[in-house]
Image: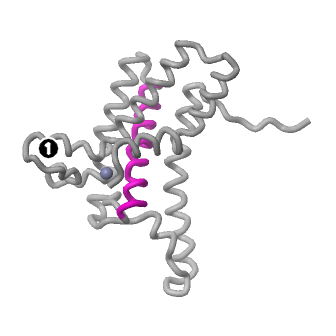
Amino acid sequence: MPYPVVHVLFFVLCISAVAVYAAARSLFRGELSLKGSMHLLFLLFVGSVCSLFPDIMIIYNLLVNGTIEHCWAGPIPTHSLLFSLPAVLFGIVAGYAKYREPGRAIYLGLFAEAAFASHLLLDDISEGGCEYLYPLYEKKISVFSMMDVSFRGTGLFHYLMISFVSVFFICSVIMMVLFVLNKYGFELRYKPEK
Ligand SMILES: [Zn+2]
């Protein structure tokens, strides 16, 4: 399993690259205020915590059982989208505590979901799959291995569907982050050339 710092760096530098880019740009232009920095740090803090959330049971197991088991919370696999619900709730509560606006709190919940999903994607790359769809489908699925399917064996339609679904899942995680960051002032837009 990747170390916690790798999960945080993957989320901050790869999935939230637009926030890092926009902040660095504003910093070099002298436009990044203290308020803006705190705003960015708060977002990245919530995202970082939620990017570690799937491994949270390691704390309990280390303290109580002396093991590093981290993949199960009772009968529920922690590396599933079902287990992202507490992370989303954490994002919503943290967002509401800071901004006192239900809309902004919901956006932060969405950001928390994307951070959680980024952990699953990284574990998927390194370990070959996660129980994404538990309890609908209880076995591990690898979004990345799915892309390697051959259309000779499965048929063209099945091949296209699997390829589309796996790419769309990764795309939707990145789009969620872009959407939330846009709502929080990190803008990236097309400017037509003159
Ligand atoms: Zn993990």
Residue 194 lies left or right of residue 27; in this view the side is: right
Whether 115 is among the magenta residues is yes
Asked which secondary structure carries label 1, the reply is helix
Label 1 sits on residue: 62
Q: Residue at x 51, y 73 (%)?
A: 148
**Residue 182 rendering spot, x and y as whole percentages:** 59, 31
Per the picture, the main secondary structure of the magenta-coloured stretch is helix
Question: Looking at the rendering, which quadrant does residue 77 occupy?
Answer: bottom left
Q: Residue at x 32, y 65 (%)?
A: 140
Identity, as a three-letter code, of the amino acid under mark 1: Leu
Q: Quadrant of the N terminus?
A: bottom left
Q: Residue at x 49, y 56 (%)?
A: 169
Q: Residue at x 51, y 54 (%)?
A: 170
**Residue 91 rendering spot, x and y as whole percentages:** 37, 31
Residue 93 lies left or right of residue 32; in this view the side is: left
Q: Which residues are magenta?
A: 104-127
Question: Looking at the rendering, which quadrant does residue 44 occupy?
Answer: top left
Judge whether 65 appears above or below 126 on screen: above
Q: Quadrant of the C terminus?
A: top right
Judge whether 129 appears above or below 151 on screen: above
Residue 72 lies left or right of residue 13; in this view the side is: left
Give 136 or 26, whichever is nearer the viewer.
26
**Residue 26 rendering spot, x and y as whole percentages:** 65, 23
